[in-house]
Image (spheres, grey):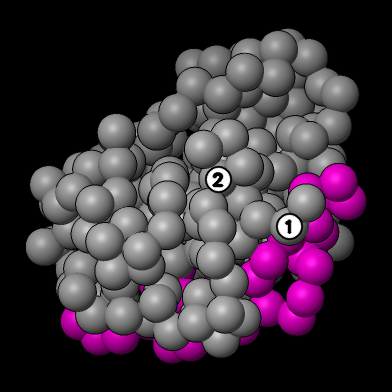
Amino acid sequence: MNVFGVDIGGTGIKGAPVDLEKGDLADERCKVATPHPATPEAVVEGVAEVVAHFGYQGPIGITFPGVVVDGVTRTAANVDRHWIGTDARTLLGDRLGQPVVVLNDADAAGVAEMTFGAGRGHGGTVIMLTLGTGIGSAVFVDGTLVPNTELGHLELHGHDAEKRASVKAREDEELSWEHWAHRLKKYLAHVEMLFSPDLFVIGGGVSRKADKFLPHIHGVSAPIVPAELQNNAGIVGAAMAAAKL
Ligand code: BGC
């Protein structure tokens, strides 16, 4: 069965029908630029454009880069503030005219990785961290997700951790891979001190370049592995959530 997944990100809104048996896209994905400002109304139009590209009808899963509780978006670290307190499920469902589920982007990516990727079959505590514009987190205990954990906003040396250790921080500050890995190591050590996970999975587009930074990370006890679904994990996880509608 194919179900549609959409991933709302800071730079792009990406979507595709997903083959839920394979855990992979069933068609080439469609991407439109995230509007600026990324207000709810403008982003909803972007999502509608992506879905219309495929003429898809049926349940749709949509990720959002912030806390989502019962379809209501509660935070907006990297999108327009008007999302805070918005009933995104109703807004998107009414515009698309289809049943929708809205969930946190890292939670969606994590569920996809736990089912089809690097976390497959893993028990114990697994923490997936998505590194991009921000840092997203998905925490699993024996395969069960604890949603909306927001570990990217832990305080590290007096700073919001994602401001120091995200991919955006590396780019904005023009840090070498080694320098950035050093920051990432401090962040991972902090998360490890709090949760003692059995495995870290590193996601986001940067997971493709894991060989550039993972070898520089020492002093973290848990194994650290790159995600396998990379940039499609959010779309796949969103579709998996929609399949339950
Ligand atoms: C948000 C998280 C999100 C992460 C990745 C953070 O700034 O607070 O909810 O998962 O960015 O997009």
Q: Residue at x 77, y 65 (%)?
A: 25
Q: Is residue 228 left or right of residue 40?
A: right
Q: Position of residue 174 (x, y in %)?
A: 51, 80
Question: Splitting the image into 4 quarters, where does residue 145 fall?
Answer: top right
Q: Is residue 81 left or right of residue 155?
A: left
Residue under pointer 1: 2
Q: Which residues are magenta?
A: 9-37
Sequence order check, earlier mark of 1 and 2? 1
Q: Callout 2, which amino acid? A: Ala
Residue under pointer 2: 242
- Give above or below for 229 relative to 219: below
- Give above or below for 160 relative to 163: above
Q: Is residue 14 left or right of residue 213?
A: left
Look at the image and tell me whether residue 216 can be seen: no
Question: Splitting the image into 4 quarters, where does residue 181 fall?
Answer: bottom right
- Spatial distance from mark 1 to mark 2, Cα to Cα? 10 Å
- Give above or below for 35 relative to 243: below
Q: Position of residue 136 (x, y in %)?
A: 48, 47
Q: Nearer the viewer, residue 196 or 38?
A: 38
Q: Residue at x 19, y 74 (%)?
A: 41
Instruction: Kindly state the secondary structure of the residue where label 2 is placed.
Output: helix
Q: Callout 1, which amino acid? A: Asn
Q: Is residue 13 magenta?
A: yes
Crowding near the residue tagged with mark 1, few <14, some 14–19, many ≥20 C-alpha atoms within 10 Å: many
Q: Position of residue 101 (x, y in %)?
A: 43, 46
Crowding near the residue tagged with mark 2, few <14, some 14–19, many ≥20 C-alpha atoms within 10 Å: many
Q: Residue at x 65, y 71 (%)?
A: 16
Q: Nearer the viewer, residue 161 or 234?
A: 234
Q: Confirm if mark 2 falls within 8 A of ligand 1.
A: no
Question: Splitting the image into 4 quarters, where does residue 164 fall?
Answer: bottom left
